[in-house]
Structure formats: C-alpha cells, structure tokens
Amino acid sequence: MDAAHDEPASQFNTLTIFNASLNFRLNWEGNFRTLADQIESALETSANLNTSVDEVVRKLNADQQTVAQFRAAYGRNPDRDSLLDALVTFEQSLVTPGSRFDSWLGGNMAALSDKELEGYRLFKSLGCAFCHQGANVGGNLMQRQGVFRELVPGKPGIVRVPSLRNVAVTPPYFHDGSVPTLEEAIRRMAAAQLDRSVSDQQVDALAAFLQTLTGTYRGVPVSEVRP
C-alpha cells in the first residue's frame, strides 16, 4: 500500500510495504503525510479496493468474532477510528531490521565482505548517499528524476526517493516498474541522476552492497516473492 495507484488513470509500481512507516511521505508523489490518510485512499480509490471505510466497518460489525476482537483491543465495536488505527498499527509493525549492513554499523566488522565494503565506498563517493540516506536509506525527501538524462518516460517528474532497504529482493524498479534487475537500475540511476558512467565491476560492487540491506521480519530474512 505504500505506493498505491493515486488515480484510476495513473499506473504506479507498488513499493514494498515493509518499512513504509519510516517514510516521511507516502506514495511516489508524496501526496499522503500519514499512514491513515494513505490507507483510506487505498480503500476508496477505484483502482485499488473500491470500497469505503464506512463499508468496511459495516462488514466488520457483521462478524461476531471480529467484533469480539475489536472489543478486546479497543473496548468497543469496530468504528472508523479503531479500523484505521488497527491498520496503521499493523503497518508500523512491518519493519525489517537485522540486515548485514545494520550488523556492520553496529560494530561487527566481519559482517561485510571486501567487495561489499567497496560497494559501500562507491555508494558514498558517487553520490548515491546524498538522496538515499537516514535510517531507511531513503524515503525522506522528494527529488527530480532524470536530472541529466531521462530515467524513465512520463510523469511524475518529481518523486519521493524510495527506501533501499530490501531493494535486492523487491524488483521491479522505478515508479513505472520498467526495470527488472538491480544491475540495470544501478546503471540507469548513475547515468540519469549522477551523470556517471559505471563499469561492470563497479555495478557488481554496488549490487553486492545493496544486497546487504536485506533485513529480517520476525527473525526470517526477507525474500523475493515471484508469481
């Protein structure tokens, strides 16, 4: 739900919901400031669930087991506020700490290989870290895409910089989902955003570093789900 379709006519690649609560804005265009607002939009937009909060509440109140669960958690039957709070609370639980990079930052110098460390050095020296920074390795500013040359065709021209946590296991990439591999995404980003030409060796090192950002959920490593 982090990057749900904003309008029926607009198609956006849906970003992973993991760590969405760490972003300062939501959706590619940053048009929601809170998880509750984004959830309500996802429920009501025809391109998503095409329902409403009131309709969901009505259905929840028709199920006695669900009513009992809401009474236990909130002391009352399902209503608008408790429904949105329950969904927000769930999304806030979807964080994935425990990546090897987190371990290295915590002092475990053996957590990263020489190649991965070289990728981290390149990540900083090439300029990737100017936008992809902070606890979520991104997600905390808006940026123009296609600074030096076209990154992907079409609008929007300014997007929220996505988090790179779990990026190696959450293809495809960019707001239109047009790039299937991490290596191609690296090449395009280097050219379009940084005006840089990167060698195959540099791409391999950067990809190796990005793979260290894969975290765990409830103690289990996040993995790519293929259809």
Image: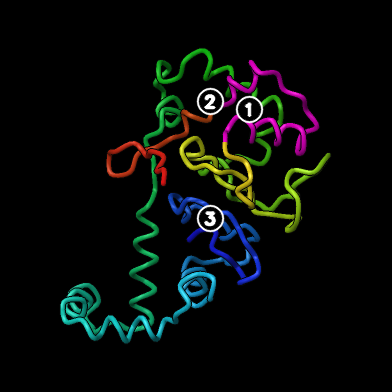
**Tag 1 residue:** 123
Horizontal and vertical percent for residue 219? 27, 39
Marks 3/1 in contact by CB < 8 Å: the verdict is no
- What's the amino acid at mark 3? Thr
Task: Tell me if residue 123 is in the magenta stretch.
Answer: no
**Tag 3 residue:** 14
> Of residues 176 and 114, which is closer to you in this image?
176
Q: Secondary structure at mark 2?
A: helix
Q: Secondary structure at mark 1?
A: helix
- What's the amino acid at mark 2? Phe
Magenta-tinted stretch = 181-208
**Tag 2 residue:** 209
Crowding at dot 1, Cα within 10 Å, few <14 / some 14-19 / many 20+, comes out as many
Give the residue displayed 43% in from the left and 35% down from the top.
214
Marks 3/2 in contact by CB < 8 Å: the verdict is no
Q: Quadrant of residue 201?
A: top right
Task: Tell me if residue 196 is in the magenta stretch.
Answer: yes
Magenta stretch, main secondary structure class:
helix
N-terminal label among 1 and 2: 1
Please tell me the numbered disc located at residue 91.
none
User: As displayed, is residue 202 above or below residue 212?
Assistant: above
Marks 1/2 in contact by CB < 8 Å: the verdict is yes
Give the residue displayed 74% in from the left and 43% down from the top.
151
Give the residue displayed 58% in from the left and 17% down from the top.
118
Q: CA distance from mark 1 to mark 2?
A: 8 Å
- What's the amino acid at mark 1? Phe
User: As displayed, is residue 185 above or below residue 120?
Assistant: below
